[in-house]
Amino acid sequence: MYKFFTSINGGDRSCIVFKLLRTMKITIILLTTMMVQVYASSSAQTVSIKANNTPLKEFVVQLQKITGYNFISSSELLNNSRPITIAVKNASLASVFERCFTDNGVAYVINDDEKTVVLSQLVTPAVSRAQQQVTGTVDDEKGQPLVGVAVTVKGTKTVTVTNNAGAFTLNLASTSATLVFSLIGFETKEVQLTGQPLKVTMKESDTRLNEIVVVGYGAQKRSELTTPQSSLNAKAIEERGLTRVDQALVGQLAGVNVKQTTGLPGKGFSIQVRGGGSISANTEPLYVIDGFPLGQSTADLTGNFPGGNALDNINPDDIESIDVLKDAAAAAIYGSRGSNGVVLITTKKGQVGKAKIQFSSSVSASDITRKVDMLNGEEWIDRATEMINTAYVNAYGAKGAKATDTDAQRLAIIGARNFSHFLDPRWSMPGRPGLKFIDWQDEIFTTGIGQNHQVSASGGTNNVNYFVSVNNINQEGIVINTSSKLYSARANVEANLNQKLKVGLNLSPSYSISQDPGYEGKDVVFHNALSMPPVVEDTAGVYTNSFKNVPYNYAPAFNSPVARAENQMGQTKRFRTIASVYGIYNIAKGLIFKTSVNVDNSQSNIMRYTPYTVTNLLSVRNSQTTVNTSGSYLTNNYQSFVNENTLNYSTRIKKDHSLNVLLGQSYNNFSSDASTMSSVGGYTHQTIRTLSAAAGVRGNTTGARNLLLSYFSRAQYSFKGKYLLSASIRTDGSSRFGTNNKYGWFPAGSLGWRISDEEFMKKQRVVSELKLRATYGVTGNNSIGDFGAISTLGSYGYGFGSTQALSIGQAPNRVANPDLRWEKSTTTGVGLDFGFLKNRITGSIDYYNRLTSDLLLNVPALATTGFTVYLSNAGSVRNKGLELEFTTQNMVGKFKWSTSFQGSHNANKVVSLGNAQSQLILPSLYTTVPNSILRVGEPLNSIYVVKNIGILTQQDIDNKAARYGTQTVGDAKYEDFDGNGIIDANDRQIVGHPNPDFTWGITNTFNYKGFDLRVLVQGQNGGSIFSVLGRAISQTGLSHIYNMTGDYRNRWRSPSDPGDGVRGKAFSNFGSIVNTDWVYSSDYFRVRNITLGYNLKQVMNFKGVASARVFVSAENYFGKDKYYGGANPESANTDLSGNGNYPQSGDYGGLPLPKTLTFGLNVSF
């Protein structure tokens, strides 16, 4: 294995990628050819078969395997019919049926569309002359025809099956018979004949308790689960025409907080399960796709995933189900990677039967949900006039300066014109000649058109099944020059080589291209668009201060946001292939061995380019030099290799006892490398954007690797299906931790009691399901750097001799810690699953208490080491929470209405910080005084600022109110928290935290005839945002050259015009202290989705078309939030701390969310 990885790392990576892509293409062609051959053989009309005095029951099983047809019959007919003797080769199917069935007194009806054969007792001609024909149709509650319903004459062996139109025909001797209608997934129904054609409506049965859900390394009936688990099925995903899997999870699952942190197209969402439990390690869950645990996706502090998000290449239409393991008792089977929860994704597989072709296509249009409220041109001029006049009077009041002075009077006092004390005379002229008003947000926002097309084919025989799909997504962004294109494919093939051995292949290649010239973050396009004054020289227009256009003298030295967006280049290309090969061998009855080999290979190439024409220096632009042109090229390569082997034994003892035991081993090898090249000295050419045109190039390379070796076991026991027990243990060995703590143990256990199955519950009719659960588990978090436990080397300079000539050498970067170990989460919980009124109301409620200890923190080091801190396990955090999920069937029948609700409350607090510390003030990159704190007893990353309590009045000044510096009337008034009469950094206090107290979602689904309507509303309450973007665009006293937020319309202007009492005067030198001006509520609610669909089969009968549905879907079209310092309360695009040991991500120019209107079509054949 080591040699294999070494050869890849040392070889030509680009060559390997192209070989891999070529191999994938050949593989897909071969698989497609194989599947066509499989389908052709299953639908052939000739058959070779041999039987000698074989019972009919056994013969039918043999025939089913050969033909691929499913046979429907009563057990009485199969057991009592004469044995079969036949030997034919390449005989027609009809002749075989005649010899084996008709000649033996068995009637048969073939349904070629459904690949079924219904067997019944052959009726003699004498009886048939007296028979009468009975016809009818069978529909579901929506009025849709049901295919394959078995229609049996009660008390007889006579049976038929409904066709594609849901119709059936029977010839009966008596019209007083009773017919029995049965179909899997529906309640069996008996109907007395009336002599008239029948119209039968069948009701879906409650299959929820018998539903099979995926758990770690296996599957269970939902009724036997002893841990809380949230699930989402394929139908909930397919009906909306989504482009990302994580988009489908928003507002759907209790305890799973999904944030849309960016408005850029194609970007991944951030997912957090049951709150954050770490200070320095990753808090994203582990993703497991078809049993393959992927390398955990780790977002950097700008909100991006350098190696790609784990869900980037997953086509939502390929998903069969999503299950989230929230509790440690369930996630502990994944050991040191289960602390943040586990998301299990199962993709679709083929089913026995004729090929099923599905096609879906949609077109969408996206616009912004809202703009940030900023001053318009008139309002900006008003504020700039006020600030310039105040500055002029303050500077030259001693010389008689007055705010009403003309240009000539000011020139006489000052002696020379400047832009700080002189007004633009055009501001007061009618029509503002020579000036143009610009709404910069309108200039960069646009309507993004999207397309999503997908085709899949699935089917199989008893020997081979397959599912293949191809998908193309093309999305334009809501801002100019942004886009995302994705090309992906999937092939899931499974073959039974014999009765004991099954093999399979899951292959998913993808290629994506995204364009982003640099919109989100500090001093990039969107931030500049907000800060740029809305007034420019008419001759420059939207291209002010770009190319050869002069800047407006009363504006900052920003280039035009439009010019930057149109001319800067930021392109990311990503190749990714996820492949799994597995084998399953039935050793003996109930004993199954499975082995799998899984590979995840990803390569990302990022190219950036900024031409000199959008640099800030006009002189450089005019001289036509390219010295200020810059470019870079970054590659990231990630490879994950996982080999897992499991042995599973299931048995039932004396009917009442069932036991399942799992033993397993896992080996995970993860490696990555990156290389960066950037230009030096500009470019030698104006049009070529590659680094070949750079005057010079410098570069850097990095590489890392980690290994994880694991052993695990689990036992599940059930007594009479109502007393349930599960216990597991896992040990992980990781290369990331110290030599003294390479291995860790992660035990778990859970209990379940199905109270509703007890005898004392049988007589009541209200409670239909009631199950009590209790859980305990220990999980870990190993999502830290690969070399955190060892002392690495870095390059340092040192001066020697009298000249102090600088020499470069290698020296340790930090102190090694051989005792470093993973963060450990211990969780206890209780829960209740319930169902009322024959499960018209179903749901669950759970309480959990999770203590995460051994947090990875930098603690003070001994002075003798030469370092101030070292990485150690110190501190703990507790998360407590309550989760509620329920679904109600409000109305049934022709009009159907159901409601699903999920809500969760989470509260976390710091329990300890190690070394007897009571608090730790976190570093801040963008504020002089830090604004975030870890304090024992308080939530993680609490917001720590001075509280603004109003506006200073003359009375406050007279009463000696505490002031910051030399504040005067009209400035902000701050709370003197420490009571010393002075406002300074010591008056900071905790005013909030970034973690929402409540998250919730509610979905209403309506069905009437062929129409379906789904409405999802989602939101959160109780959190706060400290916005560095809000600070940048609303800071009191910020120069007049910048634009400001719209609340400055109601600012303090004078004692007689105090405004709204919230925003102080425009001109002030005391607005930089961190304070609650930039703390906003993160509360919001959004109508996340409204989808209206119609089944075209209601009005059109397309031959060969199994289903056809059109739909229109609206995403994020309605909502409300309280975040006035930015465009999206969930934005995360900037590193706020500047220190990787205490990562904090926040908003410094995040785009608004897109609202998207989608029109789509789903067809299956």
Image: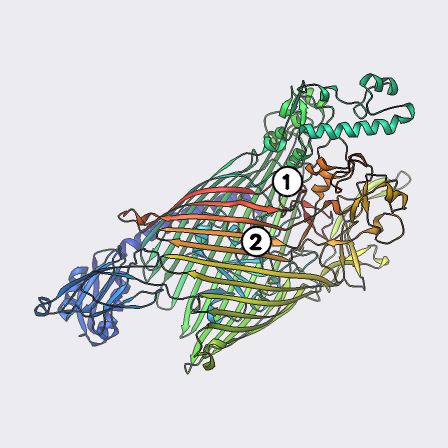
Name the residue type under label 2: Phe
Q: CA distance from mark 1 to mark 2?
A: 37 Å
Q: Residue at x 19, y 74 (%)?
A: 83
Image coordinates of residue 442 in percent, x first then y, are 59, 32
Q: Residue at x 87, y 53 (%)?
A: 979
Count of marks, rendered view: 2
Is residue 291 visible in the rendered image? The answer is yes
Image coordinates of residue 1135 in percent, x first then y, are 69, 46
Is residue 344 visible in the rendered image? The answer is no
Viewer-closest of 605 and 213: 213
Viewer-closest of 29 and 612: 612
Residue under label 2, please give it. 5
Q: Is residue 728 left or right of residue 53?
A: right
Q: Secondary structure at mark 1?
A: loop
Q: Residue at x 70, y 30 (%)?
A: 379
Near mark 2 (Cα within 10 A), the count class, few <14, some 14-19 or many ≥20, is some
> Is label 1 in contact with label 2 (beta carbons under 8 Å)?
no
Q: Secondary structure at mark 2?
A: helix
Near mark 1 (Cα within 10 A), the count class, few <14, some 14-19 or many ≥20, is many
Furthest toward the bottom, the residue is 654
Image coordinates of residue 217 in percent, x first then y, are 50, 66
Q: From this view, report whether residue 164 is shown above or below residue 84.
A: above
Q: Nearer the viewer, mark 1 or mark 2?
A: 1
Say which quarter of the image contains residue 592. Answer: bottom left
Residue under label 1, please give it. 520
Image coordinates of residue 66 in percent, x first then y, are 26, 62
Q: Quadrant of the N terminus?
A: bottom right
Name the residue type under label 1: Glu
Furthest toward the front, the residue is 1056
Say which quarter of the image contains residue 556. Answer: top right
Q: From this view, report whether residue 1067 is shown above or below residue 1080.
A: above
Earlier sequence position, callout 1 versus callout 2: 2
